[in-house]
Image (cartoon, rainbow, N blue to C red):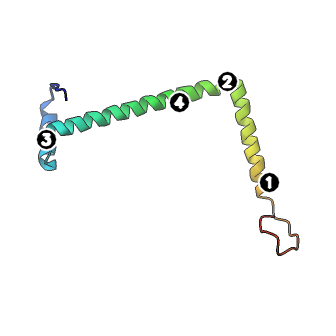
Amino acid sequence: MSAISVRLPEDIETRLAEEARLGHCPRSEIVRQAIDDYLKRRAHERFMEDLVREARAAYDTTAIQEESAELIKEADDDQTASQAPAQDTGDTTAPWWR
């Protein structure tokens, strides 16, 4: 494991020392975990920024806008059809979905 040197403002060092005391763990472990959490969060933020950028670029394409509108229309049509009242066939042996 490599070592680095970090300068901390006195108030942060005091809080770090207090957390290490309360948590019964070394300050270095708290710092390692904080850096790991930060790096994971930043990677996720970058991923989400890229995803939004790609989605915006894709939605600027007319073909994708038209396809999206068609999918919405199909979903609305399917939902409307599924909400139509069931027709009574008089056959009590037929499955309920018919």
Q: Which residue is mark 2?
A: 61
Q: Label 3 sits on what residue type?
A: Pro
Q: Earlier in the sequence, mark 3 or mark 1?
A: 3
Which residue is drawn at the image coordinates 31% and 37% (left, top)? Answer: 37
* Residue type of the residue flagged with mark 2: Thr
Reading the image, the residue beneath label 4 is 52
Give the distance between the C-alpha atoms of the residues marked 2 and 3, in whole angstroms. Answer: 54 Å
Q: Which residue in the structure is indicated by mark 1?
A: 81
Label 4 or label 1, whichever comes before in sequence order? 4
Viewer-nearest of discs 3 and 1: 3
Query: Is residue 60 rendered to the left or right of residue 41?
Result: right
The residue positioned 76% from the left and 56% from the top of the image is 82
Determine which quarter of the picture holds residue 57: top right
| Residue 62 rendering spot, x and y as whole percentages | 71, 25
Q: Residue at x 29, y 35 (%)?
A: 36
Decide if residue 74 is on the left or right side of residue 11: right
At label 2, counting other C-alpha atoms closer than 10 Å, the crowd grade (few under 14, some 14-19, many 20 or more) is few
Name the N-terminal-most of marks 2 and 3: 3
**Mark 1 touching mark 2, by CB under 8 A?**
no
Callout 1: 10 Å neighbours few (<14), some, many (20+)? few
Alpha-carbon span between mark 3 and mark 1: 64 Å
Q: Which amino acid type is shown beneath numbered disc 4? A: Val
**Mark pair 4, 1: CA separation:** 34 Å
Q: Earlier in the sequence, mark 1 or mark 2?
A: 2
Front tag of 4 and 3: 3
